[in-house]
Amino acid sequence: MRNISLLAIILLTLNGQAKASSGYAGAYTTIGSDARSVALAGATVADINSGYLAYTNPASLAYVDRLEVGLSHIALPLDRSLQSASIATRLPPTAAVSLSYIRAGDDKIQGRNSVGQPTGELTYADQMISLTFANQLTGTISMGMNANLLLISLADENAKGFAIDFGFLYHRPSGLNVAVRVRNLTGAYSWKVAAADKERGYKDYLPLVISAGTRLPWRQFVLFAATNLAYPRVEVSTGAARIGAALADPIATVHLALETEIDGRFYLRGGLNQNTPTIGVGLQYTIRKHKDSRVDYSFHPGVNREGFGHLFSWIFAL
């Protein structure tokens, strides 16, 4: 139980945001899986985010036109880190599929017993493996789905879970994009914890997160806006019997950002994730085919005076 009691604290610090977006199972996914998404304040739900399509919105995967690989590393203070990898390919004529992996972790956690005595250092890891399928319904409308396998390890305690995401996207390359994404339509972690001389099980429910966003090119800029409504799931019981979970009052967040391209290769990005400013840069270059690769960087300022973070992503199209 000592290890499990630390889990909520770790999830809160991993997210690095205010109460509006943290403190629940799976909160690490609100950080963003790549440097461009973080630099654009998490407002990319209506964007075609090459290399990280499944994380941005599963519906955007339908517009992948070649084999894409994305790799990302996020180094945060307090010994926290996040890594992600994704590979996506087209399924002619109108579909696409991808396999993605994301890991959030925290090392050198000082464990303590019930009376506050140090018991040694702990390591925490939260992992998600996603299989994504998307299809174009028309020339401008697509939909997609993520099937997510969830794994948590904290010292000698482990939990598994499963979640499903859906996305819808109206996409016009040179015009207005509009999108809706639903995360954790269903999903929970299942824990088995030793209690006295027997094992006790319980579920840690993921919140339902509904996002709506838009993307609009304007002169030399691209404007992004999104809002998230996170509905925490609260366990419902009758006496000693647990009968499921109900949705609590939603927690709303607002995300605004813009991006501009310079000389056809360089990108400047910035935005507001709630009240936290975000900033980043990108460089597109050629290895084998024209503009087949990109490297992105984002600076994480920290919102609770915990220190600065640095985010790097690499995207390759084969």
Image (spheres, grey):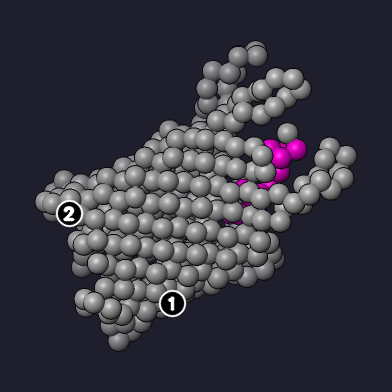
Q: Earlier in the sequence, mark 1 or mark 2?
A: 2
> Residue beneath label 1, please?
281
Q: In the picture shown, does residue 219 fall above or below 125?
A: below
Q: Residue at x 53, y 58 (%)?
A: 82
Q: In the picture shown, does residue 239 fall above or below 153?
A: above
Give the distance between the C-alpha atoms of the residues marked 1 and 2, in whole angstroms: 29 Å
Is residue 155 among the parts visible in the rendering?
A: yes
Corner quadrant of residue 276: bottom right
Q: Quadrant of the N terminus?
A: top right
Q: Residue at x 52, y 22 (%)?
A: 244
Direction from residue 187 to residue 200 in the image, left or right? right
> Residue beneath label 2, please?
140
Work out which residue is located at the far bottom of the displayed protein and give it: 263
Q: Nearer the viewer, residue 309 or 215?
A: 309
Direction from residue 266 to residue 78 in the image, left or right? right
The secondary element bearing badge 1 is classed as strand
Q: Amino acid at mark 1?
A: Val
Q: Amino acid at mark 2?
A: Thr
Instruction: Point out the stretch of residues depicted in magenta.
Output: 2-15
